Amino acid sequence: MPEPQTPRPSSPQPGPAARLLFPLALGLTLAMGLASLFVGVSSVSPGLLWAEGGTGPATEVLLTSRLPRTLALALAGTGLALAGLVLQVLVRNRFVEPSTVGTTESASLGILLVMLLAPGLPVPARMAVAAGFGLAGTGLFLLVLRRVPQRSTLMVPLIGLLLSGVIGAVTTFIAYRTDMLQSLGAWSTGDFSIVLQGRYELLWIVAGLTLVTAVFADQITLAGLGRDMAIGLGVNHGAIRALGLVLVALLSAAVIVTVGIVPFLGLVVPNVVSLMIGDNLRRTLPVVCLSGAALVMACDIVGRMVVRPYEMPIGLTMGIVGSAAFLWLLTRRRGHGA
């Protein structure tokens, strides 16, 4: 059966405004990162750090909590935004991302089973299991997608959300029967308040996976044109498609194992960037990564400030922003005759 054909936005040549997008995203990311270092319950400021001479309580908070948290936010935002971008290119639909096609829910199921059957498993092994389940969930989504007639681009995310709901319900049922609902809730909301030095370093794998994606960016873009087109252009469609799905699963699993689920990020950022500079993966990759990092840090800062001295989990703030953006994208597509 031929692959589903769904409309894709045009890929305009970057104009003057688009050329400014990278420095703008870089500047915004740096600004959010700097703000993240100095926003919180504990008092940390450049003046206080200077007065302490690098040996006081503020310096300790900066090095053991604020700096690791900021790096974790940047890496998680980069990973999830990139996972959404790669998945959208491969599936050829702007309304998919790991949390809307069953990848995230499948990875959560894998983590739950690890906690039940092998609680002593080291963190890298947990990530491998979560990635395997996430890859299986994504493969199941693609299998279902090939067997369901599609009359609209909106059918793709609808199928993904239905599949995600089924997998999520199975996960919740298992957690309920094994008294693991509290643990399930802890990583399903996405929380960076637990990030300290020594508890986030697994996320550095995102940097390596980003480099791999950059190396194969052109091939992934061509694979997204369809099997016949990719083969005609000399690309091993099956291998590149499999590589892309593995990248999506690994990026999602690394974030989920470390800080939990951050919904909709991979949906919002690639779509906004695509509206400005098109769909070429090599061209959009750096802007998407920087924008994802900036958005996650911004949502985390808002979560720290709204209910001070407490914090709102980033899964909640990002869920509000992401769901609103998802509705806007749906209505925008509907207005264009989807």
Image (cartoon, rainbow, N blue to C red):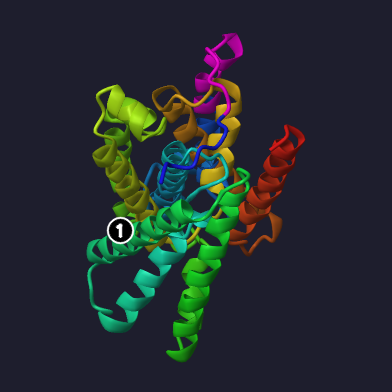
SS class of the residue under badge 1? Answer: loop
Reply above or below: 50 against 320.
above
Give percent across and percent down for residue 317.
64, 55
Residue 242 in view in this figure:
yes
Which residue occupies the foreground of this view, 229 or 116? 229
Is residue 103 toward the left or the right of residue 329 in the image?
left
Residue under numbered circle 1: 198
Reply above or below: 46 against 113.
above
Taking the spot 42% from the left edge, 68% from the top edge, the residue there is 108
Give percent across and percent down for residue 250.
32, 52
Amino acid found under the numbered disc labelled 1 = Gly
What range is drawn magenta here?
9-26
Which residue occupies the foreground of this view, 227 or 163? 227
Reply above or below: 92 against 307.
above
Give percent across and percent down for residue 167.
47, 70
Taking the spot 30% from the left edge, 53% from the top edge, the residue there is 201
Is residue 259 toward the left or the right of residue 311 in the image?
left
Residue 208 in view in this figure:
no
Q: Residue furthest front?
A: 1
Which residue occupies the foreground of this view, 43 or 133? 133
Reply above or below: 189 against 20.
below
Q: Is residue 21 in the magenta section?
A: yes
- How many residues crowd mark 1 within 10 Å: few (<14), some (14–19), many (20+)? few
Taking the spot 68% from the left edge, 40% from the top edge, the residue there is 329
Which residue occupies the foreground of this view, 338 or 45? 338
Image quadrant for the C terminus? Answer: top right
